[in-house]
Amino acid sequence: MRRIVTVAAMLLGTASADVHDDVTSRVRFNETFTRTINTDVGDIDIAYNGVSFGSSDRQSYASRMYFSHVQGAADLIDDFATYRGITLQRCKDRDIRAFDVGPSVLEDERLHRLVNWNDPELAGGWGQQMTGLYTPSDDDSNRATIYTDMYHPERSRIITHEVAHFLYDEFCLERARIDPERFAHDFEDYYESHIMPSRRISY
Ligand SMILES: [Zn+2]
């Protein structure tokens, strides 16, 4: 009896330890590095894991694009909040673990189970192809995990959407007042209309 309890506890421990390690264990990452970006809402440490090839003296196009949009999103979020009548105050200082991957990784059912499909903005989404995913934290709780489909034509939207989720939690916004999916979708649109046309983003 005791033995069974121990085994169950170990399995539970493994399951809760990190689903993301399991999901990405077979993915071959060709570019892995950690960098701190300085944004208008403070520093963000990003541990980037991407499947594109960089070189010793040059990041891949994919990762340069990724960091440019995270930077652009973080620098713009305060303008967006002001426009929405929200005052932002950062209440957390977490890192981002980024998985910039092909769409097959995002088909993993273990990731689909992490999503709150009851959110009205996501209703009916179960079973559809996910293009990105934000999860607030894992067991060490100071690190959020973000997946993005690096081949998707709307890549800038996907990155800024997931970064909006990350920042929403960094600012401890209240779900009862502001739906996080609505917030992320609205921010995507705001970003596309304010940043993309002026081509201030380069990568
Ligand atoms: Zn979302």
Image (spheres, helix red, strand yellow):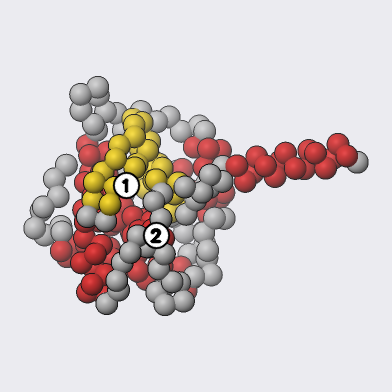
Quadrant position of the C terminus in the picture:
top left
Helix, strand or loop for disc 2:
loop
State the residue at coordinates (42%, 77%).
177
Residue 158: tell me if it is visible: no
Helix, strand or loop for disc 1:
strand
Report the front residue among 105 and 21: 21
Q: Position of residue 180 (x, y in %)?
A: 41, 67
State the residue at coordinates (29%, 71%).
87
Disc 2 and disc 1 in contact, CB within 8 angstroms: no
Q: Residues within 10 Å of mark 1 (few under 14, many from 20)?
A: some
Quadrant position of the N terminus in the picture:
top right
Vertical side of 58 occupied by 71: above or below: below
* Mark 2 → mark 1, Cα distance in angstroms: 13 Å
The answer to whether residue 120 is left or right of residue 82 is right
**Three-letter amino acid code at the position of disc 2:** Cys
**Three-letter amino acid code at the position of disc 1:** Ile
Which residue has dot 2 on it?
A: 91
Q: Looking at the rendered structure, which numbered label has been put on residue 156?
A: none
Report the front residue among 10 and 128: 10
Residue 11: tell me if it is visible: yes
State the residue at coordinates (41%, 42%).
97
Q: Image quadrant of residue 182?
A: bottom left
Q: Residues within 10 Å of mark 2 (few under 14, many from 20)?
A: few
Which residue has dot 1 on it?
A: 44
Vertical side of 31 occupied by 193: above or below: below
State the residue at coordinates (15%, 57%).
196
The answer to whether residue 190 is left or right of residue 11 is left
